[in-house]
Image (cartoon, rainbow, N blue to C red):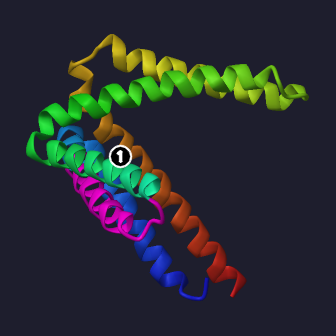
């Protein structure tokens, strides 16, 4: 990391963005929904374009269908961000419950007490978070995605700042 200063600036911007999102989680939730919508639209359009480069009709048809679904899903999120927020929040809760369950099941398949305990703890946390979201759904939808975005930006910012300062010392 030769440009530690750029990494430091990126870390500070990410940290400040996370703090801003934490201060106004509803605005951050709508921003995250719109960002997801635009990303789905881009990925969908690129998938449709790449479908014409696929060999054989089977792969081409699946790529076209997948691309169209992605694009339409993104269009829905951008066109109706409040409804999209509900959908994304519900999907996040289901994913957390599923991931938590799989982590707990995986814990019993690994050997080693410490790894098992970490997997169980991580799984229980995911189950609790998913349950908390669903227990207060749809009211939780107004802030959940914004809080997730805030936590991610803060975590990313802190890690970039630490990495940049560490690489500055090493240089």
Quadrant where the C terminus is found in the figure: bottom right
Quadrant where the N terminus is found in the figure: bottom right
The quadrant where residue 138 appears? top left
Toward the viewer: 146 or 138? 138
Among all residues in the image, which is located at the extreme top?
A: 135
The quadrant where residue 137 appears? top left
Is residue 34 inside the magenta stretch? Answer: yes
Q: Secondary structure at mark 1?
A: helix
Q: In x, y percent, where is residue 130?
A: 44, 21
Q: In x, y percent, where is residue 71?
A: 24, 52
Q: Is residue 80 left or right of residue 164?
A: left
Q: Is residue 87 left or right of residue 108?
A: left
Is residue 50 inside the magenta stretch? Answer: yes
Q: Which residue is mark 1?
A: 149
Q: In x, y percent, where is residue 18?
A: 34, 52
Q: Say whether residue 127 is visible.
A: yes
**Dominant secondary-structure state across the stretch colored magenta:** helix
Using the image, determine if residue 171 lies above or below residue 135.
below
Which segment did they paint magenta?
33-56
Among all residues in the image, which is located at the extreme front?
A: 57
Using the image, determine if residue 150 lies above or below residue 104.
below
Residue at 31 percent of width and 67 percent of height: 49
Q: Say whether residue 28 is visible.
A: no
Residue at 42 percent of width and 44 percent of height: 151
Residue at 37 percent of width and 52 percent of height: 61
Q: In x, y percent, where is residue 28?
A: 23, 46
């Amino acid at each position: 990391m030769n440009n530690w200063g750029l990494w430091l600036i990126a870390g500070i911007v990410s940290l400040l963005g996370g703090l801003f999102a934490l201060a106004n989680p509803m605005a951050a939730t709508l921003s995250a929904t719109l960002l997801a919508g635009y990303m789905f639209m881009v990925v969908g359009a690129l998938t449709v374009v790449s479908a014409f480069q696929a060999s054989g009709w089977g792969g081409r048809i699946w790529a076209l269908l997948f691309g169209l679904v992605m694009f339409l899903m993104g269009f829905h999120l951008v066109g109706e961000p409040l409804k999209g927020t509900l959908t994304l929040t519900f999907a996040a809760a289901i994913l957390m419950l599923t991931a938590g369950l799989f982590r707990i099941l995986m814990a019993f398949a690994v050997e080693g007490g410490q790894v098992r305990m970490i997997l169980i703890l991580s799984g229980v946390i995911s189950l609790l978070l998913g349950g908390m979201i669903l227990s207060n759904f749809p009211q939780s939808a107004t802030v959940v995605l914004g809080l997730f975005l805030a936590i991610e930006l803060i975590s990313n910012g802190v890690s970039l700042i630490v990495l940049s300062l560490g690489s500055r010392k090493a240089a």
